[in-house]
Amino acid sequence: MRLESRTLVACALLVLALSGCTLVDGWRRRPTPPPPPPPSAARVDLELLCRLPTDAPARQAAELARARQDAVAAPTATHRLRYALLLATPGHAGADPVAAQRQLSEILSNPDTLSAQERMLATIVLGQVERQLALLASNRRLRERSAAQAEASAADAHRRLIVAEAENARLRKALADAQAKIDAVTHIERSIGERAGGRSPPR
């Protein structure tokens, strides 16, 4: 009986020891964390927008061509948004704020097709594009006004030059007429003086 009790106690201790080892081993080997989720489309787009202006021209053109091809081949809201965002980004040859404004407005007219982050990004960029277009329009109006003013000033200067030349011609003629009259009076006075002195005037 004592042997059986001792055997049972020994088995129980062995089970406890093995269980403890298993627990300790489980504590030492923690499960590996799950891989991080892939970046969202909005984050990818934002990183692309930040990088694009500093890329080489060839890479800029390649990124724009790839985005356009994706938007045409599979015109999902995400693909169309990425292409519109690239068009809206200044600093590269393919930038087109007018086309970007049109496409962003069309995409945001159906916001349910975008994620919350994509909607926020599209709204922010559309606001920037609209401000950029307003500044461009203001600059264009200022240039046109300056050109019109410069043209009007040049025309006015030309008119004044013509008037001044006409006035100079009139003054020259008046001066020539006055000089002719003075010469005639001088000649008459000389003739009178010579006759009074008894000499015939020279021929």
Image (cartoon, rainbow, N blue to C red):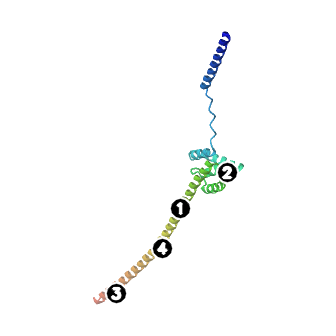
In the picture, the disc for residue 138 is 1
The amino acid type found where label 1 is placed reads Ser
Taking depth in this image into account, of 94 and 147 the one nearest to the observer is 94
Q: Which residue is mark 4?
A: 159
The residue labelled by disc 3 is 188
Toward the left, the furthest residue is 197
Give me the disc on residue 113: 2
Give the Cα distance between marks 1 and 4. 31 Å
Which tag, 2 or 1, sits closer to the chain's start? Answer: 2
Q: Are marks 1 and 4 in contact (CB under 8 Å)?
A: no
Please tell me how many numbered marks the rendered image carries. Answer: 4
Q: Residue furthest right?
A: 73
Q: Is residue 84 left or right of residue 200?
A: right
For residue 172, above or below residue 200:
above
Residue located at (55% from left, 60% from top): 134
Amino acid under disc 4: Arg
Earlier-in-chain disc, 4 versus 2: 2
Q: CA distance from mark 3 to mark 1?
A: 74 Å
> Three-letter amino acid code at disc 3?
Ile
Q: Amino acid at mark 2?
A: Thr
Decide which of tag 3 and tag 2 comes sooner along the chain.
2
Q: Quadrant of residue 6?
A: top right
State the CA–CA distance, disc 4 to disc 2. Answer: 64 Å
Q: Position of residue 16 (x, y in %)?
A: 63, 19
